[in-house]
Image: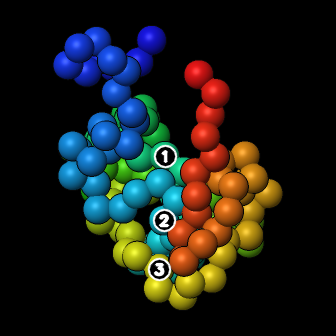
């Protein structure tokens, strides 16, 4: 069972994301500042949730662990990346992302962002 709110009701994951002060949201298209690729956000962690060994090996610029990190479907690729917020900016191209997993997460691309597919409980 997920997190519980006031009256024992389940908390929507998007509410948790907003309380973490994430700058970007699920379905938003972003641009990676360091590696110059575009992608769409499919999940947000309020803080780094990877392993210490992954962080030591991959996160060479040592971005903060206590800030949001994003799971991103990379445009024109089949890769999914895990990126610290400080390496991202909003993408203003209004172009969709091409990735084989888009349909698993989203139903449509409208006005520059993706509409999240509703999951059955």
Looking at marks 3 and 1 on the same chain, the residue that comes earlier in the sequence is marked by 1
What's the CA distance linking mark 2 and mark 3?
8 Å
Mark 3 lies on a secondary structure that is: loop
Report the front residue among 112 and 35.
112
| Whole-percent x, y for residue 70 in the image | 43, 52
Report the front residue among 50 and 6.
6
Mark 1 lies on a secondary structure that is: strand
Q: Residue at x 23, y 44 (%)?
A: 20
Colour scheme of the rendered structure: rainbow
Report the front residue among 54 and 5.
5
Left or right: residue 72 compared with residue 99: left
Label tally = 3
**Residue at the farthest right position:** 100
Q: Is residue 38 above or below residue 120?
A: below
The mark found on residue 28 in the picture is: 2
Left or right: residue 82 compared with residue 85: right
Q: Which residue is mark 3?
A: 91
Q: Is residue 20 above or below residue 60?
A: above
Looking at marks 1 and 2 on the same chain, the residue that comes earlier in the sequence is marked by 2
Q: Which part of the image, by quadrant, shows the C terminus?
A: top right
Q: Residue at x 60, y 72 (%)?
A: 110
Looking at marks 2 and 3 on the same chain, the residue that comes earlier in the sequence is marked by 2
**Residue at the farthest bottom position:** 93
Q: Is residue 12 above or below residue 91?
A: above
| Whole-percent x, y for residue 10 in the image | 37, 21
Residue 61 visible from this viewpoint: no
Q: Which residue is mark 1?
A: 43
Q: Residue at x 79, y 57 (%)?
A: 100
């Amino acid at each position: 069972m997920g997190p519980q709110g006031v009256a024992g009701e389940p908390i929507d994951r998007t509410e948790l994301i907003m309380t973490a002060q994430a700058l970007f949201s699920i379905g938003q298209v972003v641009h990676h500042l360091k590696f110059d690729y575009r992608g769409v956000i499919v999940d947000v962690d309020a803080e780094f949730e990877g392993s210490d060994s992954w962080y030591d090996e991959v996160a060479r610029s040592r971005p903060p662990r206590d800030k949001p990190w994003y799971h991103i479907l990379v445009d024109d690729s089949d890769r999914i990346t895990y990126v610290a917020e400080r390496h991202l900016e909003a993408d203003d191209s209004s172009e969709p992302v091409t990735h084989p997993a888009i349909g698993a997460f989203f139903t449509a691309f409208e006005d520059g962002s993706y509409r999240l597919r509703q999951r059955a409980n």
